[in-house]
Each structure stands twice: as C-alpha cells, then as structure tokens.
C-alpha cells in the first residue's frame, strides 16, 4: 500500500444526501463510515442507493487536513445536504465546539436533546429501518421492558392514578357524549369473560380491601 489514509465521499441517492470522511487504512479494508446519523451498513451489504467515491489518498496528516478543508468548504456552501455534524476533527473545545450554546455543550440534558434531534432526523430519513429496529429491540428485550414498566408503576402508582383521574375528569367535561359512549362500551366489555375482566375484578378486589383497611384504621 503506497498510502496511509484516504478521504472518501458517500452519496445517498435515496435521500439526496452526502457524507464526507477520512480513514486511516486501505480503501478495501471493510471500513464504510463513522456517521452516527447516516444509515449504518457493512462493506459486504452496501445498499444499491449508496455510492462511495475516493477523493484523495496520501499520508494521515495530509488526509486529515484535506478532510477539514473540504468540510469547511461544504459548510459554507451546502451544509444542509451533508450528514456530517462538525467540520473539524478532533472537535474543538469551548466556544468553538459545534454543540456549544451558552456553556451547555457538556450539560447532560442538552446532550440528550441533541441526541433526540439526531434520532428524529434518522427516523425521518429511514422510517422502515427505524420501525424494524424498534420491533427487533422489543422482541429481544420484551421481558426486561415489561419488568421495568411494572417496577415504575409500583413505585409511582398513586401519582399515575391521580393523573388518570384528572385526565378522565377533563375529558368527560370537554366531551360528555364520547365519554358516555366509551363508558357504555367498557361496561359491555367487562361483562364478557377474558383477561380484561379478570384484571378489572382483581383491581376491584384490591381497591375494596385497601379502603376497608383505611376505614378500620380511621375508626380505631
């Protein structure tokens, strides 16, 4: 190999977007890209709408400098067509950092919001892949998810019930006809045997036992 690194450019013809990067190694070593926003894929399974072009080859220092030069040029002219989020590597510190706003670049809440924005952008550009990833994650972690939901409910059940009661009062006030119809359907559903009726009877039994205990404590 007569070069240490190369600068590459991916073109996503489906979304009409680009990603420009630098990599230390050979162009056929299996590396694709390091973007956290652009669709992830392997060298063996490149989507038909993704095309890569090698812009230059040379030493690591020269290619790193060339990448920065190219990114700065794109940022001035057509940055909205690029998946890149910064035009400098390694990222600058302080006020020169791309996520710096009034000292919030290191704030956990700000970083979380920044990640949410990136996630929305990915889901918008790749809706089918995002939905498939969610389905796969749920299948793989279903038991863990349900366990966490149950633990959260047990810990905050009074607050959750109060919010539901408040929402119910507001809904019945704003939509009385729909509320009555919904209540009628619920009564019809509870008459039929099934898991819904069993859960309701179990909750009703727990509620009566709790009220009975509270009344006995009050009269004691």
Image (spheres, grey):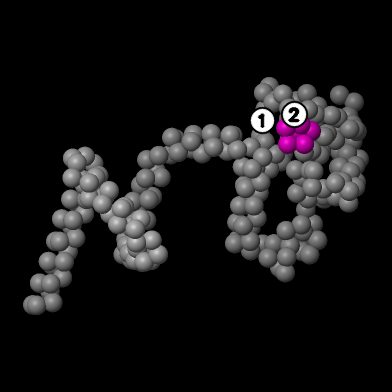
Give, as a single range, the part of the protein colored magenta: 11-16
Point out the image quarter for the N terminus.
Answer: top right
Query: Which residue was labeled with disc 2?
Result: 50
Q: In which quarter of the image is residue 213?
A: bottom left
Q: In this view, does 157 lie to the left or right of 201?
A: right
Mark 2 or 1 closer to N-term? 1
Task: Tell me where residue 204 appears, x and y as whole percent.
Answer: 18, 56
Which residue is depicted at the point 48% across and 36% down? Answer: 135
Q: In which quarter of the image is residue 139?
A: top left
Q: Are marks 2 and 1 in contact (CB under 8 Å)?
A: yes
Crowd around label 2: few <14 · some 14–19 · many ≥20 (10 Å): some
**Magenta-colored segment: predominant secondary structure:** loop
Crowd around label 1: few <14 · some 14–19 · many ≥20 (10 Å): few
Query: Which residue was labeled with disc 1?
Result: 41
Point out the residue furthest to the top here. Answer: 44
Q: Is residue 88 magenta?
A: no
Q: Does the magenta stretch include residue 14?
A: yes
Task: Tell me where residue 175 appears, x and y as whole percent.
Answer: 38, 61
Label 2: state its secondary structure. Answer: strand
């Amino acid at each position: 190999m007569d070069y240490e690194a190369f600068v590459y450019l991916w073109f996503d013809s489906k979304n009409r977007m680009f990603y420009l990067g630098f990599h230390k190694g050979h162009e056929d070593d299996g590396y694709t890209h390091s973007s956290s926003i652009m669709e992830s894929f392997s060298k063996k399974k490149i989507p038909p709408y993704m095309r890569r072009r090698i812009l230059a080859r040379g030493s690591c220092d020269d290619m790193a400098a060339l990448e920065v030069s190219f990114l700065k040029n794109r940022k001035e002219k057509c940055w909205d067509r690029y998946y890149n989020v910064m035009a400098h590597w390694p990222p600058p510190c302080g006020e020169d950092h791309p996520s710096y706003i009034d000292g919030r670049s290191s704030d956990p809440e700000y970083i979380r919001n920044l990640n949410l924005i990136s996630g929305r952008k990915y889901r918008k550009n790749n809706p089918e892949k995002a939905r498939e990833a969610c389905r796969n994650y749920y299948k793989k972690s279903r038991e863990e998810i349900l366990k966490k939901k149950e633990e959260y409910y047990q810990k905050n059940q009074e607050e959750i019930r109060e919010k539901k009661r408040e929402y119910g009062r507001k809904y019945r006030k704003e939509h009385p006809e729909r509320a009555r119809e919904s209540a009628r359907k619920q009564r019809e559903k509870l008459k039929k045997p099934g898991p819904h009726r069993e859960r309701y009877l179990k909750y009703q039994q727990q509620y009566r036992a709790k009220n009975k205990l509270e009344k006995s404590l009050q009269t004691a």
